[in-house]
Image (tube, grey):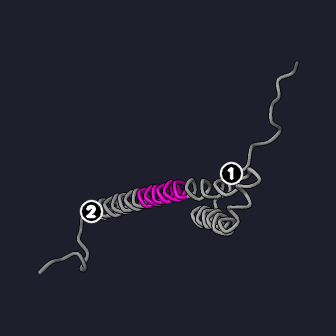
């Protein structure tokens, strides 16, 4: 049997409003729980009380999901800020090296702007 190999690379994962999506889903589960709560007697009579408790479990798991995705989002932002700071530092070092090499080529003669009183 021939080994399956992909014909093209997989696309990058889509990043969207993950926190807002999880918060919206959690709110939806809780609203479903509240909407079914007045009918608890009917569900109990027919042996379907799990219909009431399932949305409550979904809302509880959604709270855990909110905590998780907020932490993930904060970690992604910290990583991006750290990478941006590292890029800025690398750019500043390159500019300093270019400036010092220009001064070395000009014979280390200070410009008027470089003189101090």
Look at discs 2 and 1 and give the one toward the viewer. 1
The residue stretch that appears in magenta? 63-83
Q: Which residue lies at the image location 87% right of the left edge and 21% below the top edge?
A: 2
Q: Is residue 75 above or below residue 116?
A: above
Side (left or right) of 21 relative to 68: right
Q: Pointer 2: what residue?
A: 107
Rendering coords of residue 8 (x, y %)? 80, 42
Residue at the limit of the structure toward the top, as seen here: 1
Q: Which residue lies at the image location 69% right of the left edge and 65% below the top edge?
A: 36
Side (left or right) of 92 relative to 108: right
Residue 109, by quadrant, is: bottom left
Task: Label 1, secondary structure: give it.
Answer: helix
Rendering coords of residue 4 (x, y %)? 83, 28
Tell me, yes or no, whether the two marked residues, 2 and 1, touch with CB atoms within 8 Å: no
Rendering coords of residue 87 (x, y %)? 43, 58
Q: Which residue lies at the image location 25% right of the left edge and 79% below the top edge?
A: 113
Q: Pointer 1: what residue?
A: 50
């Amino acid at each position: 049997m021939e080994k399956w190999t992909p014909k093209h690379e997989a696309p990058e994962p889509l990043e969207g409003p993950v926190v807002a999506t999880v918060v919206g889903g959690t709110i939806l589960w809780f609203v479903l729980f509240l909407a079914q709560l007045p009918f608890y007697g009917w569900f109990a009579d027919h042996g379907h009380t799990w219909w009431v408790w399932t949305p409550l479990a979904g809302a509880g798991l959604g709270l855990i999901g909110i905590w998780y995705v907020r932490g993930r989002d904060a970690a992604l932002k910290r990583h991006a800020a750290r990478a941006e700071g590292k890029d800025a530092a690398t750019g500043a070092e390159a500019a300093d090296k270019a400036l010092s090499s220009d001064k070395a080529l000009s014979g280390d003669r200070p410009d008027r702007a470089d003189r101090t009183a």
